[in-house]
Image (cartoon, coloured by chain):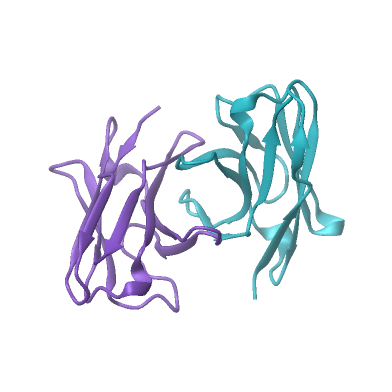
């Protein structure tokens, strides 16, 4: 069965960096695009970024463009999110999700990892 | 970029039917697929409808999706409500490499 397990969350000061990872299993990782989606406390879901199945293209929400970088390691079946210049408004649970294809959206999601940006 | 607007909350008794709307602010609702996700607090979101009206395996046929071009909106209908259906529900669509989630609807089963 599809499994997505996020890690790397924690408490970080504003302006600092953090790297999230997502270990994928139960499917052929190299055949699927992958997303990061976040949910701030008391707020709704917000799409963050997508990387194509082969890593050839990446796209970002305007709120994180230029600060976050999505990447993947096919050899390790791992998705990453490098987050730089963090702000208080980046505080959220970050979910890794597999893309369902057909220009649709995510189909399977991980449990999420909490990032708190605070001094 | 477009927005997807949902009612903040809906409530109904067990066994009844609820319908959640998702209105697209600009561009045609029919131009890109709409997905619906169920999200219980502390759990991973799960897909209940994909590609406008398709149910993933394991999702009961009490869940159904549709789109209405005249109102530029999508709808999720849950019939025969059960207490386990109590959750937040989000619609989602796509345009020009931008993925948009709806504002979310809290479903309460009284």
Instruction: Please provide percent x and percent y for residue B103.
Output: 36, 41
Instruction: Please provide percent x and percent y for residue B46.
Output: 49, 63
**Among all residues in the image, which is located at the extreme left?**
B70
The one nearer the camera, B88 or B50, is B88
Q: Quadrant of the C terminus of chain A?
A: top right
Q: Residue at x 35, y 33 (%)?
A: B3
Place residue B5 in its image quadrant.
top left
Instruction: Please provide percent x and percent y for residue B11.
Output: 22, 59
Q: Quadrant of the N terminus of chain A?
A: bottom right
Vertical position of residue B52 compared to residue A50: above or below: below
Would you say A88 lies left or right of B6 here?
A: right
Place residue A71 in its image quadrant.
top right
Q: Chain A rendered in what hue?
A: cyan
User: Do we see residue B16 in this rendering?
Assistant: yes
Would you say B7 lies left or right of A95 here?
A: left
Q: Residue at x 31, y 63 (%)?
A: B53
The one nearer the camera, A62 or B78, is B78
The one nearer the camera, A36 or A86, is A86
Q: Residue at x 22, y 72 (%)?
A: B79
Instruction: Please provide percent x and percent y for residue B1.
Output: 40, 27
Vertical position of residue B76 compared to residue B55: above or below: above
Q: Residue at x 35, y 65 (%)?
A: B86
Provide the letter of the chain coloured purple. B
The one nearer the camera, A84 or A2, is A84
């Amino acid at each position: 069965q599809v499994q997505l397990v996020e890690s790397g969350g924690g408490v970080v000061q504003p302006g600092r960096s953090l790297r999230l990872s997502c270990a994928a299993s139960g499917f052929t990782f190299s055949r699927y695009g992958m997303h990061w989606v976040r949910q701030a406390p008391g707020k709704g879901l917000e799409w963050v970024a997508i990387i194509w199945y082969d890593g050839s293209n990446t796209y970002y929400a305007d709120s994180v463009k230029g600060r976050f970088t999505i990447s993947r390691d096919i050899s390790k079946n791992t998705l990453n999110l490098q987050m730089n210049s963090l702000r208080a408004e980046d505080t959220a649970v970050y979910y890794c999700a597999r893309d369902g294809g057909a220009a649709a959206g995510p189909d399977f999601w991980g449990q999420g990892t909490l990032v708190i940006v605070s001094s | 970029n477009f927005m997807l607007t949902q009612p903040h909350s809906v409530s109904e008794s067990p066994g009844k039917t609820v319908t959640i709307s998702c209105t697209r602010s600009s561009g045609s609702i029919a131009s890109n697929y709409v997905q619906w996700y169920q999200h219980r607090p502390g759990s991973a979101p799960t897909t209940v409808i994909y590609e406008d009206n398709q149910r993933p395996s394991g999702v009961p046929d009490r869940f159904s999706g549709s789109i209405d071009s005249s109102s530029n909106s999508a709808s999720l209908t849950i019939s025969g409500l059960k207490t386990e259906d109590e959750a937040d529900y989000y619609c989602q669509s796509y345009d020009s490499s931008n993925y948009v989630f709806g504002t979310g609807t809290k479903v309460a089963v009284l």
